[in-house]
Amino acid sequence: MAIPALVKSLDGSKARVDFGEGVLRDVNVSLVDAKAGDYVLVHAGYAIQTVDEEDALETLALWKEILATEKDPGS
């Protein structure tokens, strides 16, 4: 399973990415050609694919909805 994240900065094969709501992590981007401002799919600490912004934001919204349901199973 891979989660989309926004590339904030690059330092060689490492990127600082934002998963949304201030969740920042360092990931390895050696498998993709990414630049700051791109969205990437991250799996196990590696960016495995770039994705367009629309798809990334839609997926993040779905994840947010899923997680909200998990926190409040009565909804």
Image (cartoon, rainbow, N blue to C red):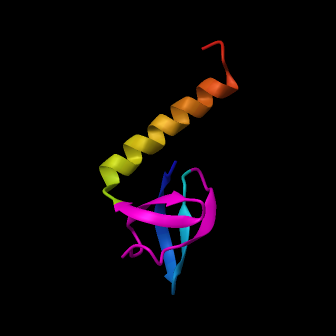
60 w.r.t. 24: above or below: above
Identified at 59% across, 65% down, the residue is 45
State the count of labels.
Answer: 0
Q: Which residues are magenta?
A: 21-50
Q: Quadrant of residue 73?
A: top right
What is the x, y in percent for residue 54?
Answer: 31, 49
Name the side, left or right, on which 42 lies relative to 39: right
Is 4 in the magenta? no
Q: Find residue 18 and report its image quarter.
A: bottom right
Q: Provide residue 24's location: percent of width, then percent of height.
A: 62, 62
The furthest residue to the bottom: 12
- Where is residue 21? Give x, y as percent: 58, 50
Compared to residue 48, the image places residue 71 above or below, namely above
Q: Which part of the image, by quadrant, shows the C terminus?
A: top right
> What residue is at 61 percent from the left and 56 percent from the top?
22
Residue plotted at (36% across, 63% down): 50
Between residue 31 and residue 70, name the one nearer to us: 31
> In the image, is residue 41 part of the stretch drawn in magenta?
yes
Residue 65 in percent (x, y) is at 52, 31
Judge left or right: residue 58 versus residue 5. left
Residue furthest toward the top? 74
Where residue 25 sits, quadrant-wise, is bottom right
